[in-house]
């Protein structure tokens, strides 16, 4: 128990600061031994001293900032970060923003954008992640996205079949490359192909593993480029084909020269041609294109919107689904914070969650109430002990102090396991009560896996944190005051209430804040002895990190808890001072 | 606070009543820890005293749970992991923490309060929040589930303890000793190791012990930052308590209580020694 000693900053004696002030007051510039003005010379010394101090602190400061402060900042960032929607559905979000008025189902344009986005997402396997993200906001989104990801391949199949029926050449990857690729890319690709073939021939001749390894061909195929002609004449087709080529090259490590394009590419081509675009196309395969243009007028059609609603899921016509996507399309969201206070973000604005899903308000309230209960239990048990310890002779109190410090030093899990064993229905406490005849054998007390268990175990665990600050304050209360009160005629109770107790209040304050701060963030003990009714916010945070994987909500709950703790910490600093935290 | 001879009956009742109440509270504090010691020698797989144990029959007691601890692979692996992680984390927090505490005790430190607040924060922020943040951040940078990640996280947790104990020791440090040493021609490094270090050593060691016990007992951070390869003793106990509670846990707990008694004694001796060296009376 270190007593509150003045910090090094308050050391008496002349310091460069005071000397400087004196130097200022002197009339002329006082000179140092080497002839420079004393003021400048002292300033230099002071600066050197500051730099030396900072130099000693810097490594640790850097260490704590990287290993501790950065993670906390990351958590705060994650509680509002929401880039997944905008990243996975970039075209849909823009189209929705431009054309949808929030009523009914959106236009064909939005569904086309969605088809393209989903096609890419399902190739990259991103759509399920997006589905689980949106499922936190609206239930059913997860399965909707999973189903859509499976069926999105079939969008435009009608058109693909008709194009191929028209001319089998449409099935050939080479046809598409000829139509779409920039001639420069063609040349580079051909050169790359030659190099690869040559390398493979060499490898085939290799005899040892080392040789094989040395000859490995690691050069990637040149990045696909759409020709300016295709871009101008067949804009829709070019855009989606370029996307296709990019995914094929980067994700599947394959070549557009060997893969048949997605069905939606055919649909885009149909749209381009039926809108009478591509008339001025003057590239390769022009004849094929002209023939197709003449034929598309008689094609069987199927709008993307109709496909989504009829073939994939009619939920895609539900404005609720679109409202959720639109509400969570911005890169930052208050959605997680709203969820943590039982609100939700809907297209109509902020609304309370349905009654049966309001759990966090209850959870925060329970955490507060239980922490308060534990805090008061700690005062009730800790005050008499601290009083006794501070009024006994030093030798005896040091001996009894061991009884306080031993639990303080014992592993948290040891104490929790002790309570888990003691509080069981077949445990020592129930056995003793039955043996004493206080409780019937068939009617043993339920002391564990409920709030009682958490409160008993945590009071025991946190009690030393109440006793130690109380003791260090009570130690400084002079006994003369109470004696004076008694001799002036006060009863023992009055003397205690009016004289002793007010002097011990700072200790109670410090102990309370300490116990409360520790209690509201506790995880291990409530998890092990709290069952379902005796758990805290922290248990919910852990659940969202490791089981439900809703990291954003975990981060938001954590941020709220952190804010609580920091406010309390600030109060503690004002009342006690962080420098005076005593450690046993 | 002895009872004066002229005390009234009411005062006498209150005097003894108060002592009884205090005795009961002390019992509440210490009994749960002590009771697991005999229970850990239970010959049966029970968590309560069997009739045989109450009758003090020697067959009712056995060392089987201790044997299980020392032969079971998962417990031994956990013990080994704890022994690998805690000293590394302690070494890191002590080395950096002592240096910084010396820097902080200089008379002119700009932003002293802010720096102190940052350095103490790992002790104040609830563990579950630190664990969540570290889990997110360490998985971003690829440290999640690695030995280094757990050691770094534990070192960060231990730092406040080192800072607090070492700055407390430095409060009573007589700066004229370093000046005298400098005057006699010693460089700053030599002054630190030959003059300052021996004097603040008790503070450094007890700070180190705090950091050690913090890491050795820590379970929340390691649950999130670590992976199965870093399963420590407290982690193994946590799993045991949550899933299939076995009396081996009580044997482990008893061993840990013995270790805490050892550490408590060491810290207490160091504290008294440090106060004696700084000319304060042992408290």
Image: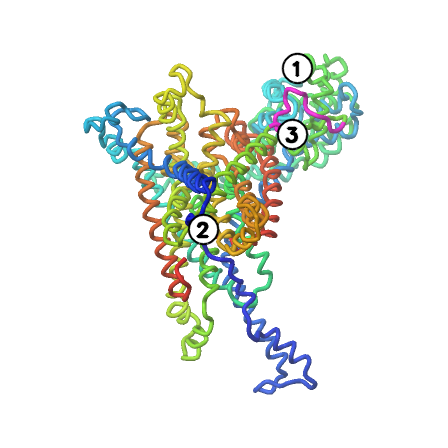
User: Would you name the residue on which mark 3 appears?
Assistant: A339
Instruction: Indicate which label's residue lies in the foreground, 1 or 2.
Output: 2
- Whether labels 1 and 3 share one chain: yes
Residue A101 seen in this snapshot: yes
Q: Residue at x 33, y 41 (%)?
A: B257
Magenta range = A349-362
Percent across and percent down for residue B50 are 27, 24
Q: Residue at x 65, y 37 (%)?
A: A80
Task: Give the letter of the chain under mark 1.
Answer: A
Percent across and percent down for residue A300 are 72, 12
User: Would you name the residue on which mark 2 appears?
Assistant: A391
- Whether pointer 3 and pointer 2 mark residues with C-beta atoms closer than 8 Å, the reply is no
Tell me the CA gap for discs 1 and 2.
Answer: 77 Å
Instruction: Indicate which label's residue lies in the foreground, 3 or 2.
Output: 2
Residue A217 seen in this snapshot: no
Circle 2 crowding by C-alpha within 10 Å: few under 14, some 14–19, many from 20: some
Say which element carries label 1.
loop
Q: Earlier in the sequence, mark 1 or mark 2?
A: 1
**Disc number for residue A494:** none
- Whether labels 3 and 2 share one chain: yes
User: Would you name the residue on which mark 1 appears?
Assistant: A313
Percent across and percent down for residue A217 are 46, 40
Q: Residue at x 44, y 42 (%)?
A: B12
Q: Earlier in the sequence, mark 1 or mark 3?
A: 1
């Amino acid at each position: 128990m270190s007593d509150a000693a003045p910090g090094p900053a308050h050391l008496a004696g002349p310091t460069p600061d005071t000397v400087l002030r004196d130097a200022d007051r002197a009339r002329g510039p006082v000179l140092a031994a080497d002839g420079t003005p004393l003021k400048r010379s002292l300033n230099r010394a002071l600066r050197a001293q500051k730099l030396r101090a900072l130099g000693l602190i810097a490594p640790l400061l850097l260490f704590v900032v990287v290993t501790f402060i950065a993670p906390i900042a990351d958590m705060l960032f994650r509680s509002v970060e929401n880039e997944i929607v905008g990243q996975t559905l970039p075209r849909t979000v823009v189209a929705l923003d431009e054309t949808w008025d929030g009523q009914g189902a959106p236009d064909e344009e939005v569904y086309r954008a969605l088809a393209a986005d989903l096609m890419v997402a399902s190739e990259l396997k991103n759509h399920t992640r997006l589905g689980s993200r949106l499922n936190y906001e609206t239930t059913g989104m997860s399965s909707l996205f999973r189903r859509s990801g499976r069926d999105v391949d079939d969008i435009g199949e009608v058109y693909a079949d008709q194009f191929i029926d028209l001319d089998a050449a449409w099935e050939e990857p080479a046809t598409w490359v000829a139509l779409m690729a920039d001639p420069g890319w063609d040349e580079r690709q051909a050169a790359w192909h030659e190099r690869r073939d040559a390398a493979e021939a060499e490898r085939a001749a290799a005899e040892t593993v080392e040789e094989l390894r040395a000859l490995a061909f690691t050069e990637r195929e040149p990045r696909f480029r759409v020709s300016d002609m295709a871009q101008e004449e067949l804009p829709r087709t070019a855009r989606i084909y370029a996307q296709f080529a990019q995914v094929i090259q980067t994700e599947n490590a394959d070549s557009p020269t060997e893969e048949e394009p997605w069905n939606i590419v055919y649909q885009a081509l149909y749209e381009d041609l039926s809108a009478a675009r591509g008339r001025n196309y003057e590239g390769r395969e022009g004849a094929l294109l002209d023939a197709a243009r003449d034929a598309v007028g008689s094609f069987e059609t199927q709008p993307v919107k109709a496909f989504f609603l009829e073939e994939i899921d009619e939920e895609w016509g539900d404005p609720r689904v679109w409202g959720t996507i639109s509400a969570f399309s911005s890169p930052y969201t208050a959605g997680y914070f709203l969820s943590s206070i039982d609100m939700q973000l809907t297209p109509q604005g902020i609304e309370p969650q349905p009654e049966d899903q309001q759990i966090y308000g209850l959870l925060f309230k329970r955490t507060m109430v239980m922490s308060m209960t534990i805090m008061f239990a700690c005062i009730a048990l800790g005050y008499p002990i601290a009083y006794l310890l501070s009024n006994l002779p030093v030798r005896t109190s040091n001996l009894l102090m061991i009884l306080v410090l031993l639990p303080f030093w014992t592993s948290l899990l040891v104490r929790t396991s002790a309570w888990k064993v003691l509080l069981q229905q077949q445990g020592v406490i129930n056995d003793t009560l039955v043996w004493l005849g206080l409780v019937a054998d068939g009617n043993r007390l339920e002391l564990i896996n409920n709030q009682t268990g958490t409160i008993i175990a945590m009071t025991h665990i946190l009690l030393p944190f109440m006793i130690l600050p109380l003791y260090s304050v009570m130690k400084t209360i002079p006994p003369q005051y109470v004696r004076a009160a008694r001799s002036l005629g006060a009863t023992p109770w009055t003397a205690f209430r009016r004289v002793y107790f007010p002097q011990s209040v700072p200790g109670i304050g410090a102990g309370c804040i300490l116990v409360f701060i520790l209690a509201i963030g506790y995880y291990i003990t409530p998890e092990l002895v709290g069952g379902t009714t005796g758990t805290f916010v922290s248990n919910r945070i852990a659940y969202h990190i490791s089981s439900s994987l809703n990291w954003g909500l975990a981060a938001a709950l954590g941020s709220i808890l952190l804010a609580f703790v920091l406010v309390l910490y600030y109060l503690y600093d004002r009342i006690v001072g962080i420098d005076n935290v005593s450690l046993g | 606070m002895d009872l004066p001879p002229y005390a009234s009956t009411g005062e006498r009742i209150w005097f003894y009543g108060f002592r009884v109440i205090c005795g009961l509270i002390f019992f509440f504090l210490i009994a749960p820890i002590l009771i697991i010691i005999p229970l850990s020698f239970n010959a049966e797989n029970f968590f309560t005293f069997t009739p045989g144990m109450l009758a003090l029959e020697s067959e009712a007691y056995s060392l089987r749970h201790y044997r299980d601890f020392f032969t079971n692979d998962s417990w031994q692996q956990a013990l080994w992991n704890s022994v690998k992680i805690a000293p590394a984390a302690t070494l890191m927090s002590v080395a950096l923490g002592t240096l910084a505490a010396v820097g902080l005790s200089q008379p002119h430190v700009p932003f002293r309060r802010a720096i102190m607040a940052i350095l103490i924060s790992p002790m104040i922020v609830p563990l579950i929040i630190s664990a969540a943040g570290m889990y997110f951040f360490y998985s971003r940078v690829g440290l999640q589930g690695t030995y280094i990640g757990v050691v770094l996280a534990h070192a960060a947790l231990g730092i406040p303890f080192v800072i607090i104990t070492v700055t407390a020791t430095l409060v009573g440090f007589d700066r004229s000793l370093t000046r005298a040493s400098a005057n006699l021609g010693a460089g700053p490094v030599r002054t630190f190791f030959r003059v300052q270090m021996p004097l603040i050593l008790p503070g450094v060691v007890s700070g180190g012990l705090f950091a050690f016990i913090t890491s050795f007992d820590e379970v929340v951070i390691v649950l999130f930052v670590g992976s199965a390869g870093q399963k420590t003793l407290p982690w193994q106990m946590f799993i045991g308590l949550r899933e299939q509670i076995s009396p081996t846990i009580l044997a482990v707990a008893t061993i840990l209580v013995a270790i805490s008694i050892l550490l408590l004694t060491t810290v207490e001796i160091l504290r008294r020694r440090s106060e004696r060296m700084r000319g304060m009376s042992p408290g």
